[in-house]
Amino acid sequence: MLGHYDDAVASFERALALRPAWQEASANRDLAKARGALLDQGGADAGDQREGADEIIYDKTAKPNEGQDTTTQGGPMDDASVRALWLKRIATRPADFLRARFAYQLQAESDGDPKAPAP
């Protein structure tokens, strides 16, 4: 997901050299190849690596509370694209997750919550 698809493909190739029948590695290698090709083509769904802010234009002549017209490219996102975007924006640091989980458990224990999960 960081856009290092050539490195990912090479890693999956090494894994498949050690274990040729590994279907997950083969599928992930093919996925990395496809995403790398899409990124190279500069496709509309090049994904998170080429996604950035639209051009920002400041309109000094606009009256307050009038707003600006906003146009979007393409149509609505399909379900798979929405899920990919959602997953990309999740904070995935394990330390943050564990900190929140343990804080919740401590709070639940101090409140005497019988449904609190055991640590």
Image (cartoon, grey):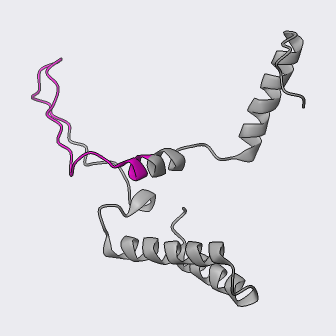
The answer to whether residue 60 is magenta is: yes
User: Which residue shows up at 82% across the image and 17% down it?
Assistant: 107
Instruction: Establish if 112 lies above or below 47.
Output: above
Instruction: In this rendered view, identify the residue nearer to me: 73 or 67.
Output: 73
Instruction: Establish if 80 lies above or below 117.
Output: below
Instruction: In this rendered view, identify the residue nearer to me: 83 or 101.
Output: 83
Count of number-bearing discs: 0
Residue 87 place in picture, x, y as percent: 53, 48
The answer to whether residue 78 is magenta is: yes
Q: Which residues are magenta?
A: 58-82
**55 lies left or right of 29:** left
User: Which residue shows up at 71% across the image and 82% down it?
Assistant: 15
- Image quadrant occupied by the N terminus: bottom right
User: Which residue shows up at 54% across the image and 72% down it?
Assistant: 4
Residue 39 place in picture, x, y as percent: 39, 71
Q: Main secondary structure of the magenta part?
A: loop
Residue 22 place in picture, x, y as percent: 69, 79
**112 lies left or right of 23:** right
